[in-house]
Image: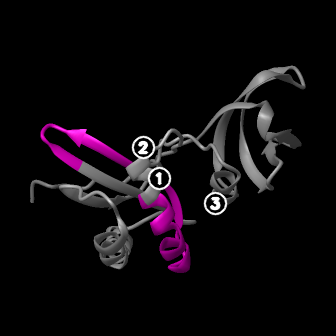
Amino acid sequence: MSDRSRVAQQAFDLALPVVEGMGFDLVDAEYKKEGSYYFLRLFIDKRGGISIEDCELVSRAIDPVFDKQLHESPDYFEVSSPGLTRPLVTPSDFSRHEGEEVEVSFYAAINGTKNLTGIIVKASQEAVVFASGDEKLEVRFEQIASAKRTINFKRTDKLIDITE
């Protein structure tokens, strides 16, 4: 994510070593006015996803840091997951989701296609290797127009009777 406000960037910089020290990735920070209130939000992630307990742990660790060092005083401070549908943008986004299926669009056709659905095999600072069918494709980051995780719901054939 990009174009953080001055306050959001300061919060991001203060929170980064604390969040990483706790074993999480700090994905982004935002400082927004909603109605008459100012909200400061941190977005954290880790391989396997974020729980409410994770958000609470990070919030408790960061709150005293912000109280002492943040130049602004938001009305509300929240820690959240970036969400399942958040686009993958940075090399660390792709690394965090290695082994997961993604939908990728390219700026120009690669091997005759501008779109790919495949598994992230490996991500480095320069490129991502995708597996689609029996093929593997290495793509440099500057070739990727957009990428997002696919969400697959598992179907169950068991019906639960809720009337009893």
Q: What residue is drawn where x is 28% and y is 72%?
A: 67
- Residue drawn at x 60%, y 44% is 88
Residue 54 position in % (x across, y down): 39, 72
Image coordinates for residue 51, horizontal then vertical, percent = 38, 68
Residue where numbered disc 1 is placed: 9
Are dots 1 and 2 in contact, CB under 8 Å? Answer: yes
Q: Which residue is mark 3?
A: 96
- Name the foreground residue: 143 vs 110: 143
Q: Is residue 163 magenta?
A: no
> Where is 22 relative to 126, above or below?
below
Does the magenta segment cover residue 29? yes
Q: Is residue 91 above or below residue 117?
A: below
User: Extreme front residue here?
Assistant: 71
Foreground pick, 127 / 4 = 4
Residue ID for mark 2: 5
Residue numbers of the magenta segment:
11-38
Residue visible at 75% across and 22% down in the picture = 107
